[in-house]
Amino acid sequence: MTAPPLVLTVAGSDSGGGAGIQADLKTMLALGVHGMSVLTAVTAQNSQGVHGAWELPAEAVRAQYRAVVDDIGADAVKTGMLSSAELVETVAGLLAGTGAPVVVDPVGVSKHGDPLLAASALDSVRRLLLPTATVATPNLDEVAQLTGVRVEKEADLPRAAAAVLAHGPEWVLVKGGHLAGDAVDLLTDGSEEHWLRAPRLDNRHTHGTGCTLASAIAAQLAHGLAVPDAVAAAKEYVTGAIAAGFSLGSGIGPVDHGWRLRR
């Protein structure tokens, strides 16, 4: 049998299973790729928030990455929670020598507002991590955190995208889900723009949306799609996952990564 495309996620663990490594691997399975993982942190997390986080040593992160890439390889890599400057610098160095498309989700805070990136790491994200990205996928809070640009309306998205592109990614997808109205995102490489729209869904159970979208983009890139096509396909997948999001615990439940299997 022919092996499926290979995608590696470098991210933290969500013990509640809604975001992080768990969301990434579920997304990859749903989209027909073989998911592999490098764990960067362990969080004690549920539907109400993050109750504790413990970063892994850079040596452990490096060893996991080398074990996977040197033996198995990767057709695409996705990064998520990298909580310190040391981890950002370690992962950026590893990515630079991998030769596969990279999706950087510059995770700053959790769905519940819990900080997941030290302020001291922001400079390393700008200087070292974003330049490795085939696609960077910041939300509006992360754009503000990284660039100082605050988006109040849809017309502000091109300015926000330009500010992120100035730090070196090939493409940026600025996620406008926090704006009023339709869920509109802007994908651009500085010369062409792709506006992706979806109706806003009346479902509060959206935990893991960002991780899921970034992993879906990586999966589609591993399948060989061009960036605009990969992002459009990922947007369609995550919109369906949000629509099927379900209650879990007493807080915000997760999106449903297996929604197509149960459709």
Image (cartoon, helix red, strand yellow):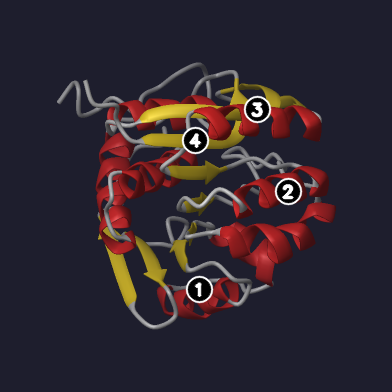
Q: Secondary structure at mark 4?
A: strand
Per the image, the residue denoted by label 1 is 161
Q: Position of residue 76 (x, y in %)?
A: 44, 44
Q: Residue at x 33, y 55 (%)?
A: 231
Are discs 2 and 1 less than 8 Å apart at CB? no
Question: Which callout, 4 or 2, points at the residue further toward the start of the chain?
Answer: 4
Q: Amino acid at mark 1?
A: Ala
The answer to whether 222 appears left or right of 174 in the picture is left
Q: Position of residue 20 (x, y in %)?
A: 55, 32
The answer to whether 235 appears left or right of 263 in the picture is right
Q: Amino acid at mark 2?
A: Val
Per the image, the residue denoted by label 3 is 64
Which numbered dot is residue 8? 4
Q: Position of residue 49 (x, y in %)?
A: 64, 29
Front-lying residue, 89 or 107: 89
Are discs 3 and 1 less than 8 Å apart at CB? no
Q: Quadrant of the N terminus?
A: top left
Q: Secondary structure at mark 2?
A: helix
Q: Amino acid at mark 3?
A: Gln
Which numbered dot is residue 88? 2
